[in-house]
């Protein structure tokens, strides 16, 4: 999982893709951009039609009855996070960047006349202009500044956070301004922490599955420390969360899979029917740019040799080419939209009961104690957060089974669904028992020197947050997954 590059050979025949115009071959069109400098590795911009509509509250809709099809136009779905006078909406839908009235709710979302958008080098070229336009269209009274940070978990630190403060102070921003987080979980966590420190309002605009289903909701903000992940931060709720599902059109496969780890988590800890839905629809959620490449091979008689997956650069090229050609729609937008909506419902419900993680909210961290140890021990950014959490969930499930709290069928189902989601089911080989224990000893869930864990107990969809477990089970799990 740590490496995503391969070797392969490619030959282009003279015939055109079926159902495309006689003058357009999306592959040669895409490849021609390489020499002109029009392409960069990773995310690429594509366009799709707008819309999913409706308004829901947590637990409002039977999960197994959801249709999975094409996008439909309409108003966004709204999930409310109920926190009394600090409640806020989560807007979910396609084409929301083209609905400026959502962000320009000056009574509720944007306070004052100055806004600063915090984003990164990957997202800025794709969506910064759209967000600025959505904030200012028809309203010249609002001025927007922005700060573009380097992309990656390894930059989620105090030095990078200071760049946000520097820009805010240089721009003479006061406590009537609004911070806007445009990006994935790293940007959302840092922008939120900056807003909490600056005592200003902020808005979350997440652009990854990971951020859309988890980190943008609930007000957890912060940065990493060399000794542990997310050890410095604050609880600080946004004014709203705006999820434009079109941003997933440019999300690389590896990032999409990483976010699905958190989706799977909700099913395991509290929503068994949602987990069953995932088991039926995982291929619709994970259908990837590699699948588009398979279509490319079929239509163009391309010969290739591939050992794992395509490089990030060619994934981007083939995705853009095929979205333009209309030959393949490799990701099911309705399936993803439903998974995001249901995940947000689960998160919103938990946060409304336990905002600051005194008990219930801690259960959302299934696999995270093991996973954070992997991220810290292996090096921030070497594995994506969801990859580490996936391996951590397998370890937590293994420990739950060793304690006699779940049966073997759950162990198998967890392993199966993670493999189908193209996620790891074991930690990196370089992780040792001692590495796990040293990092887990400073985990935020330690209380009075006692490591508390989230473990499954009982039928699927049930878990506990506890420090009362046989330490031998933990030792046996660590030994089973580590060489030393």
Image (cartoon, grey):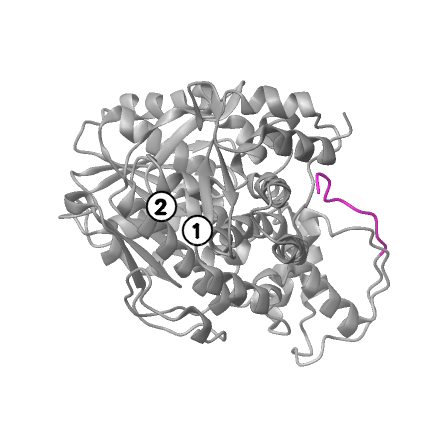
* Marks 2 and 1 in Cβ contact (< 8 Å): yes
Query: In the rendered view, does 140 fall on the left or right side of 331?
Result: left
Q: Residues within 10 Å of mark 2 (few under 14, many from 20)?
A: many
Q: Position of residue 168 (x, y in %)?
A: 29, 26
Quarter of the image where the N terminus is located: top right
Q: Residue 72, relative to residue 400: is it above or below?
A: below
Q: Position of residue 192 (x, y in %)?
A: 34, 34
Q: Residue 430, relative to residue 25: is it above or below?
A: above
Residue linked to disc 2: 217
Q: Residue 48, relative to residue 234: is it above or below?
A: below
Whether residue 483 is in magenta: the answer is no
Res. 461 in view: yes
Res. 171 in view: no
- Seen from the viewer's position, the closer of residues 138 and 10 is 10
Please name the predominant secondary structure of the magenta segment in the image: loop
- Mark 2, secondary structure of its residue: loop
Distance from label 2 to label 1 (Cα)? 7 Å
Q: Position of residue 11 (x, y in %)?
A: 85, 62
Residue linked to disc 1: 213
Query: In the rendered view, does 92 fall on the left or right side of 427?
Result: left
């Amino acid at each position: 999982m740590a490496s995503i590059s391969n070797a392969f050979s490619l030959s282009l025949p003279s015939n055109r893709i079926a159902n495309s115009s006689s003058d357009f071959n999306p592959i040669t069109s895409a490849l021609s951009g390489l020499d002109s400098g029009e392409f960069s590795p990773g995310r690429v911009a594509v366009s799709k039609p707008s819309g999913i509509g409706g308004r829901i509250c947590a637990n409002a809709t039977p999960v197994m009855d959801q249709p999975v099809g094409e996008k439909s136009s309409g108003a966004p779905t709204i999930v409310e996070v109920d926190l009394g006078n600090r409640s806020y909406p989560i807007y979910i839908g396609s084409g929301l960047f083209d609905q400026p009235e959502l962000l320009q709710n000056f009574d509720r979302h944007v306070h004052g006349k100055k806004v600063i958008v915090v984003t990164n080098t990957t997202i800025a070229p794709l969506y910064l202009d759209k967000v600025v336009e959505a904030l200012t269209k028809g309203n010249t009274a609002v001025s927007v500044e922005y700060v573009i940070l380097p992309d990656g978990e390894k930059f989620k630190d105090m030095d990078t956070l200071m760049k946000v403060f520097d820009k805010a102070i240089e721009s003479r921003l006061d406590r009537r301004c609004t911070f806007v987080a445009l990006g994935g979980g790293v940007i959302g966590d840092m922008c939120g922490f900056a807003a909490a420190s600056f005592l200003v309002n902020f808005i979350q605009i997440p652009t990854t599955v990971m951020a859309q289903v988890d980190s943008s909701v609930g007000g957890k903000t912060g940065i990493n420390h060399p000794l542990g992940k997310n050890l410095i931060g604050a609880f600080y709720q946004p004014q709203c969360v705006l999820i434009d599902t079109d941003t997933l059109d440019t999300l690389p496969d590896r990032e999409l899979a990483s976010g699905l780890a958190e989706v799977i988590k909700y099913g395991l800890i509290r929503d068994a029917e949602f987990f069953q839905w995932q088991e039926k629809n995982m291929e619709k959620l994970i259908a990837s740019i590699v699948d588009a490449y398979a279509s490319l091979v079929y239509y163009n008689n391309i010969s290739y040799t591939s050992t794992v997956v395509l490089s990030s650069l060619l994934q981007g090229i083939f995705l853009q080419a095929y979205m333009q050609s209309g030959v393949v729609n490799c990701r099911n937008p309705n399936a993803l939209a439903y998974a995001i909506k249901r995940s947000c419902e689960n998160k919103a419900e938990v946060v409304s009961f336990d905002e600051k993680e005194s008990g219930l909210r801690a259960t959302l961290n299934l696999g995270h104690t093991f996973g954070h140890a992997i991220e810290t021990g292996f090096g921030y950014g070497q594995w994506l957060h969801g990859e580490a959490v996936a391996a951590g969930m397998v370890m937590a499930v293994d420990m739950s089974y060793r304690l006699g709290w779940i049966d073997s069928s759950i162990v198998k189902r967890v392993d199966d669904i993670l493999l189908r989601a193209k996620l790891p089911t074991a930690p990196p080989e370089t992780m040792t028992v001692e590495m796990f224990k040293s990092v887990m000893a400073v985990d935020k869930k330690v209380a009075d020197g006692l490591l508390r864990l989230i473990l499954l107990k009982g039928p699927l969809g049930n878990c506990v947050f506890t420090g009362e477990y046989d330490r031998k089970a933990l030792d046996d799990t660590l030994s089973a997954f580590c060489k030393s």
